[in-house]
């Protein structure tokens, strides 16, 4: 099965720096959210990655809390 890696393909896993840009949060806040369980992450080797679905879930959590 071929994987489409064209530039228009949405990332499925974000590095911490990418998640920082997506959410507009600092590195320390991203790591604190991961430690507290509010932002899911996975580990591949030594790299911590944040699934795109986890970013969407975190935004939905913030919207629910604001309501």
Image (spheres, rainbow, N blue to C red):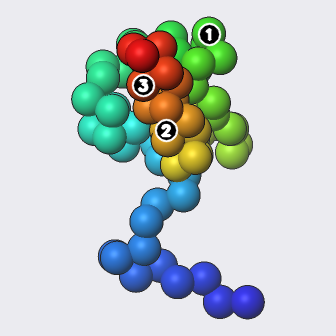
Cα distance between the residues tagged 2 and 3: 13 Å
Residue 64, numbered circle: none
Identify the residue at image location x=30%, y=19%: 26
Work out whether mark 1 precedes mark 3 in sequence or the reverse, and give the earlier one.
Answer: 1
Q: Position of residue 16 (x, y in %)?
A: 44, 35
* Relative side of 18 to 31, left or right: left
- Mark 2, Cα crowd under 10 Å, few <14 / some 14-19 / many 20+, is many
Q: Looking at the figure, which quarter contains the C terminus?
A: top left
Residue 36, numbered circle: 1
State if disc 3 and disc 1 touch (CB < 8 Å): no
Residue 63, numbered circle: 3
Work out whether mark 2 precedes mark 3 in sequence or the reverse, and give the earlier one.
Answer: 2
Closest to the observer, 24 or 67: 67
* Relative side of 34 to 27, left or right: right
**Callout 1: helix, strand or loop?**
helix
Identify the residue at image location x=42%, y=74%: 9
Q: Let me know if residue 37 appears in the view.
A: yes
Cα distance between the residues tagged 1 and 3: 18 Å
Residue under label 2, please give it: 55
Q: Position of residue 51 (x, y in %)?
A: 58, 46
51 in relation to 38, above or below = below
């Amino acid at each position: 099965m071929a994987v489409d890696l064209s530039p228009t393909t949405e990332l499925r896993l974000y590095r911490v720096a990418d998640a920082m840009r997506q959410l507009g949060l600092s590195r320390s806040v991203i790591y604190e959210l991961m430690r507290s369980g509010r932002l899911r992450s996975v580990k591949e080797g030594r790299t911590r990655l944040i699934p795109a679905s986890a970013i969407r879930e975190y935004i939905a959590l913030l919207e629910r809390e604001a309501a």
